[in-house]
Image: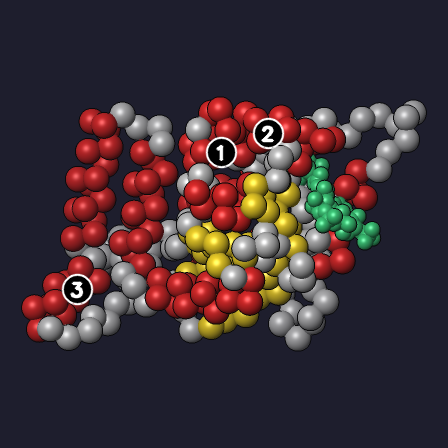
Amino acid sequence: MDQSDTTAPVLTARDGGVLVVTLNRPDKLNSFNEAMHAGVREALDLAENDASVRCLLLTGAGRGFCAGQDLSDRMSTPDAPPPDLTRTIESNYNPLVRRLKALPKPVVCAVNGVAAGAGANIALACDIVLAAESAKFIQAFSKIGLVPDSGGTWTLPQLVGLARAKALAMLATPVPAKQAVEWGMIWQAVPDAELMDNALDLARGLADAPTYGLGLVKQAMEAATINDLDTQLDLERDLQGRAGRSPDYREGVAAFLAKRPAQFTGRAPDGEGRE
Ligand code: T3D
């Protein structure tokens, strides 16, 4: 990940505790090729392994966020054998979504323009999604005979309900950012010119927050999509036990009682082995 190379397919930059990751193939609407997958993997390695990264902010360069798979890598002739798409899903898209979901830190997505195919579902896999008012989300897969991937068939029905999810997947109807907010797909739509300032403010605030606890919030919310209430109540008990042993909880209570701003570190409780 060469910070000096502004032509790299993925750019990373630090802003305090925020790692800003920018998909950077603007001429191709930041569609994914192997090099971009490799760049995103490196960025996620950094986010996972560097305790000073407390929040990840994902965005795209240029007028689009991400147009999914680079289809020019999928050109084939009628006599060629069909491609085995299970391989790219297994090695690229599925690990990416799993890692975004499992990252024990908040992930903000600033959708700066069109998010199509896997690009839409990768955005929706992030924890808090802001979009420029001009952005739109398109389940473009059906236009080329494919099935929504990158978690789309799981995420979309949860966010917008089965009726809308099926129609969006079958019709590939673009969902403008404001409608995405109304439907509960994303958190906020903001004027285009204000997107990055808003996203950075949000990410900086999260990076200064008790991020160990936020990682547990994320874990609980994801688990709730498959757990029954009893199981979830048990999980909440266990996670609250861990949160209650964290330095940030001690600091939060002390700061509240002393009527001073809290200084959170995001550190895990002693003996837990992750920060
Ligand atoms: O294969 C696997 O690994 C399996 C996994 C698949 C995951 C997927 O994501 S499948 C879905 C792939 N994505 C699409 O089908 C979306 C294709 N793109 C579009 O439908 C449109 O480009 C958009 C609706 C996203 C935006 O439309 P518009 O009119 O704003 O822009 P445009 O003119 O179509 O695109 C601008 C340029 O980006 C253009 O290049 P050019 O003509 O200026 O040289 C266009 O070809 C290029 N581009 C856009 N999307 C892709 C792309 N090039 C390659 N792959 C793309 N996905």
- Callouts 1 and 2 close, C-beta under 8 Å: yes
Residue placed most toward the observer, 212 or 119 = 119
Image position, residue 268 (x, y; %)? 27, 57
Pick whichever of labels 2 and 3 is earlier in the sequence: 2
> What residue do we see at 24% from left, 32% from top?
232
The quadrant in which residue 62 appears is bottom right
> What residue do we see at 44% from left, 29% from top?
161
The quadrant in which residue 7 appears is bottom right
Is 117 positioned to the left or the right of 73 in the image? Answer: left
The quadrant in which residue 86 appears is top right
Callout 2, which amino acid? Ala
Pick whichever of labels 1 and 2 is earlier in the sequence: 1
> Which label was assigned to residue 156?
1
Disc 3 target residue:
252
Image position, residue 154 (x, y; %)? 48, 30
Pick the quarter of the image with the C terminus: bottom left
Residue placed most toward the observer, 101 or 256 = 256
